[in-house]
Amino acid sequence: MEQLVTVKQGMQPTFDGVKVGVVKIGIADGAPAIQFWIRTAEQQRKQAFREGQSVTLPGAGLLTVTSIHPADDSTAASATLTYDAGHVTD
């Protein structure tokens, strides 16, 4: 089952027990980027992504960065993520 989630910097959504902290949303090397802090009871890691990239969350499903919207003069930075619990891994 797919779930669409909009996040802002500082949020910490949890997907099937895996906490995904949104560390930073902005521009890196001239392109929109997002940095996550992915945490489970057994491991934690910081990782950066571009639009369209995916990561398999440990023991959970597939998280895809659908779109990234860096901050501008009138709106805060945000990103849209798609979580697919159907891609469960060990």
Image: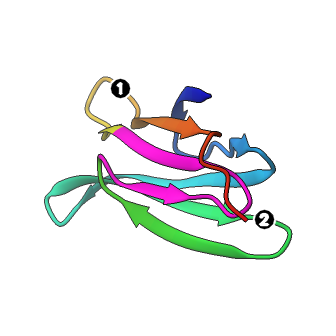
SS for callout 2: loop
* Residue type indicated by callout 2: Thr
Please tell me whether mark 1 sits on a helix, a strand or a loop: loop
Q: Return the residue nearer the eye: 55 or 70.
A: 55
Q: Is residue 55 magenta?
A: yes
Q: In this image, 14 relative to 65: left or right?
A: right
First to last magenta residue range = 52-66
Image coords of residue 59 (percent x, y): 74, 60
Residue type marked 1? Thr
* Residue 33 place in picture, x, y as percent: 32, 54
Q: Residue at x 74, y 54 (%)?
A: 18
Q: Which is nearer the N-term, disc 1 or disc 2?
A: 2
Residue at 41% over, 65% down: 48
The x and y percentages for residue 37 are 60, 63
State whether residue 31 is above or below residue 80.
Answer: below
Label annotation for residue 75: 1
The nearer-to-camera label among 1 and 2 is: 2
Q: Of 24 and 73, which appears nearest the observer?
A: 24
